[in-house]
Image (spheres, coloured by chain):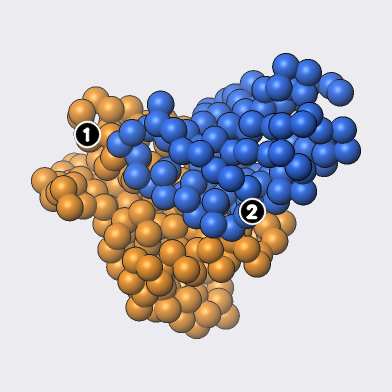
């Protein structure tokens, strides 16, 4: 039973205010958002920061929902179940973090997309956003390909990411988005 | 023309399109799972309205939050409005919500419709 206390201590030391590991659907997205929102409200967070955190959470969660179904995986499958979502909060910032399996074949493209994005400044991201919104059709599962761009714009910081090998076919994609609590 | 009246939920906006009373408004939160499906009747309504539009149409966006999938559909709504003569958009935002103000400005740069910005 020690792992209960260990997990609790990890959450405390990492300043995690919310962790969800499991199945991701629009319904769980709504529940997680409602919980996180209550937490932000009760802590009296400034409304501008609250909105940014909410914004980044929505895109991060919907990314997972979209990708777990995009790969032909129905809700409840092993892959979609093994995704994780967390938020941490300290004096300086919130971090929205996600982890989900992606096929190894998708890693190179995702890496180059994220590197492209991280190389852009505020105006560059704005141009990218406008370019995508003008020229894309909504993909079947409702993605516009704008999620990462929007997360980068709202956070104003680089997106941190890494890949861990899971098995022959899948890597675990970890993403971390920082939202500063300090006034600009 | 029939009124399109969609009551808002925790992830979809309130939509009221009423030709007779000249009320055209999208408000609240927009983060549906399938934004294309959600906005389909809205765009169809606007296209039908275009054939028999009022001399002037003031279309209000009073959004608290929208996700990126919705932003693409909002642009589609605006593009449908662009085809109609006498359309003006009023873009509402909370006075401390710079991101929502900027989002409105970006939309205004993407379509040829006059935008007016108001805080609420």
The answer to the question of whether label 1 and label 2 lie on touching residues, with beta carbons closer than 8 A, is no
Secondary structure type for disc 2: loop
Q: Judge whether A145 appears above or below B90 on screen.
A: below
Judging by the rendered image, the residue that carries numbered circle 1 is A45
Return the x and y of residue A151 as percentages of the image width and height: 40, 57
Residue drawn at point x = 37 percent, y = 62 percent: A152
Location of residue A42 in the rendering, given as x and y in whole percent from the top left corner: 24, 25
Say which chain tag 2 marks: B
Percent of width and height locating residue B24: 67, 28
- Chain bearing tag 1 is A
| Mark 1, other Cα within 10 Å: few <14 / some 14–19 / many ≥20 | few
- Disc 1 and disc 2: Cα gap in Å? 38 Å
Q: Is residue B29 visible?
A: no
Q: Residue A175, labelled with which disc?
A: none
Closer to the camera, A90 or B53?
Answer: B53
Tell me the quarter of the image containing the N terminus of chain A: top left
Colour blue belongs to chain: B
Image vertical order of residue A115 relative to residue B8, above or below: below
According to the colouring, which chain is orange?
A
Left or right: where A140 falls relative to A121: right
On the question of residue B56 being in view, the answer is yes
Residue at 56%, 68% in the rendered image: A131
Residue A56 location, x and y as percent?
39, 50
Residue occupied by mark 2: B112
């Amino acid at each position: 039973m020690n792992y209960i206390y260990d997990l609790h201590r990890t959450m405390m030391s990492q300043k995690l205010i919310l962790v969800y590991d499991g199945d991701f659907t629009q319904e769980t997205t709504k529940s997680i958002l409602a919980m996180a929102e209550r937490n932000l409200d009760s802590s009296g967070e400034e409304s501008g920061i609250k909105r940014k955190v909410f914004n980044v959470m929505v895109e991060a969660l919907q990314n997972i929902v979209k990708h777990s179904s995009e790969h032909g995986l129905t809700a409840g499958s092993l892959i979609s179940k093994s995704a994780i979502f967390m938020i941490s909060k300290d004096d300086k910032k919130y971090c929205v973090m996600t982890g989900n399996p992606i096929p190894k074949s998708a890693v190179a493209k995702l890496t180059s997309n994220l590197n492209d994005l991280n190389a852009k400044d505020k105006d560059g991201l704005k141009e990218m956003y406008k370019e995508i919104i003008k020229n894309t059709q909504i993909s079947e599962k409702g993605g516009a390909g704008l999620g990462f761009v929007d997360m980068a714009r709202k956070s104003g910081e680089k997106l941190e990411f890494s890949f861990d090998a899971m098995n022959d076919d899948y890597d675990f994609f970890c993403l971390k988005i920082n939202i500063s609590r300090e006034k600009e | 023309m029939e009124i399109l009246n969609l009551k808002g939920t925790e992830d979809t906006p309130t939509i009221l399109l009423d030709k007779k009373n000249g009320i055209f408004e999208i408000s609240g939160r927009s983060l549906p799972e399938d934004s294309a499906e959600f906005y389909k009747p809205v765009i169809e309504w606007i296209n039908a309205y275009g054939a028999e539009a009022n001399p002037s149409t003031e279309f209000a966006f009073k959004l608290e939050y929208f996700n990126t999938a919705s932003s693409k559909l909002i642009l589609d709504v605006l593009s449908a409005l662009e085809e109609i003569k006498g359309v003006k958009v009023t873009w509402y935002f909370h006075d401390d919500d710079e991101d929502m103000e900027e989002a409105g400005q970006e939309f205004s740069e993407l379509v040829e419709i006059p935008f007016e910005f108001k805080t609420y």
